[in-house]
Image: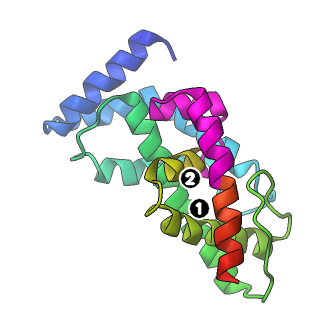
Amino acid sequence: MNDRDAGEITRLLRAAHEGGEAAAASVMPLVYEDLKKIARNQLARWRPGQTLNTTALVHEGYAKLADAAALEWEDRRHYFAIAAQAMRQILVDYARGIFAAKRRHVRVDIDLAHLPDDGPARAEQVALVDQLLERLEKLDPEMVRIVECRFFAAYTLDETADALGISRRTVQRKWERGRAWLVALAQESE
C-alpha cells in the first residue's frame, strides 16, 4: 500500500465516523487485499478443508468492522489492529464450534508458533489462548494486542509494529514475554 492510499484510508475512516456512509463503503476496496492477506496468513495455519475460508473470514471481519463504524478511527493502523481483533473473535467462535461438536478431553500445550494438526486439538488451543488473553488483558492490554496480531492475524513483527504504531523491538520483547505469560497462566489453570 502506498502513502497516498494510506492517507485516503485514514481520511475515509474519519469521514465514516462523522456519519459518512459513502465514505465507509469506499474503505472496503482500499483495504480488501490487506484484509485478505491477514485472513490468508491466519487460515494457512488451519487444516485444509475447513469450512471457514479466506473470503468468509474477510467478509465476517469486515461486517464486524462496519458495525464499529461509530468508532473514532485514528488511522489505517488503528483500523487494521481492530481488524485483527475482529478476526480473533471470529476464529475463536469458529474454534469453539468445532471443539463443542467434537469435544474430547485433550489438553494441548500452548505453542503460539504452531497450531496442532488435529482439528479438536487446534480448536481447543485457539479457545484456550483466547481465555488466557482475557486474563492477560488485566495485566498488560498492549501485550494482548501484540499476541492478537501475531497469533490470530499471523502478522510479522514488522507488520505488528506498524499496525500498533510501536517499535519492532517493543513488539519482539512483549511477544516473548506474552508467550511466557500465556504458558504460565495455562499451567496455573491446570
Q: Residue 91: which numbered mark, if any?
A: 1
Q: Is residue 148 visible?
A: yes
Which stretch did the figure color magenta? Answer: 150-178
User: In x, y percent, where is residue 85?
Assistant: 47, 52
Across and down, in percent, residue 130 comes to 57, 66
Please name the residue that numbered disc 2 is placed on.
Answer: 57
Q: Specify whether 156 is left or right of 18.
A: right
Label 1 Cα neighbours within 10 Å, binned few <14 / some 14-19 / many ≥20: many
Residue lying furthest right: 117
Residue at image x 62%, y 27%? 158
N-term-proximal mark, 1 vs 2:
2
Q: Position of residue 128 (x, y in %)?
A: 64, 72
Tell which of 128 and 19 is nearer to you: 128
Quarter holding residue 126: bottom right
Location of the C terminus (image quadrant): bottom right
| Residue shown at the point (55%, 45%) measured from the top left | 146
